Amino acid sequence: MGKFQVIDHPLIQHKLTIIRDKNCGTKVFREVVDEIAMLMAFEVSRDMPLEDVEIETPIGKSVQKTLSGKKVAIVPILRAGLGMVDGILELIPAAKVGHIGMYRDHETLKPVEYFVKLPSDIATRQLFVVDPMLATGGSAIMAIDALKERGASNMKFVCLVAAPEGVKALQEAHPDVDIYVAALDEKLNEDGYIVPGLGDAGDRLFGTK
Ligand code: PRP
Ligand code: URA
């Protein structure tokens, strides 16, 4: 089974409270999602491999550490995952970005795939699949299926708010994928929304409804 981690740093909990508030407007919502994604990236990237490199400081020669190994790609699940990309790029500016378009049918709650565009070397990269919400888990499972079909094998799923039902479904479908969340909420309601959650993340990010 992959790792499951709640990244509950006080700064993250504080910022999450700001965006959970229904009175938080689009501008602040977007800014704070970005900030939380950046803070999460710090922890999600903790096991990135390092290698030695010889450099010369103003004082003399020295062997120091530099990142090595697999390069990173960030894969947001559209639309709402887009809100997390820039924050992660602040920390990992060399990452490539792939896109997977997926929406949840409001009647069936089943995800529908509508767009996939990925870096050509996806199979050799460490992927951070990002989406603010993990509800039933359907969208994340289908997105990771789509990535595996295209050769990806090394993936971490990063979300802001998860329901226990979604975590369980994703772990069962993709036990090789590590899951990082900022908060594990109580449950799903009868409409498939996370309780207490933050509502419809895509609508709140982009001001649609
Ligand atoms: C939301 C969210 C996830 C999905 C989670 O997207 O961003 O992708 O729902 O639900 P699930 O775990 O039950 O699949 P939505 O379908 O609202 O699309 P949007 O981002 O384009 O608004
Ligand atoms: N998608 C959202 O945007 N919010 C939820 O609570 C569940 C699915």
Image (cartoon, rainbow, N blue to C red):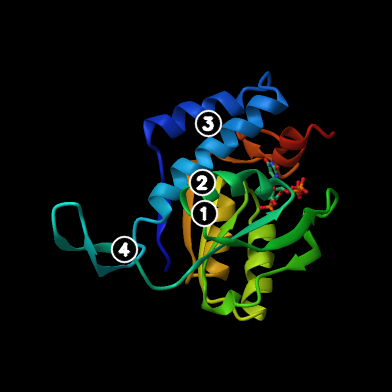
Q: Helix or strand or loop: what does disc 1 sit on? A: loop
- Identify the amino acid type marked 2: Glu
Residue 90 marker: 2
Tell me residue 65's x, y (percent).
Answer: 26, 62
Disc nearer the start of the sequence (4/1): 4
| Residue at which label 1 appears | 93
Q: Secondary structure at mark 3?
A: helix
For label 4, the crowd category at 10 Å Cα-Cα, with few meaning under 14, some 14 to 19 and many 20 or more, is: few
**For the residues carrying marks 1 and 3, which lies nearer the camera in this image?**
1
**Lower position in the chain sequence, tag 1 or tag 3:** 3
| Amino acid type at mark 3 | Leu
Tag 2–tag 1 contact (CB < 8 Å): yes
Q: Nearer the viewer, residue 85 or 193?
A: 85
Q: Who's the residue at 45% across and 45% down the image?
A: 40
Compared across the picture, whether 55 is left or right of 24 comes to left
Inter-mark Cα distance, 4 to 2? 18 Å
Residue 182 x, y percent position in the rendering? 48, 42
150 versus 83 height, above or below = below
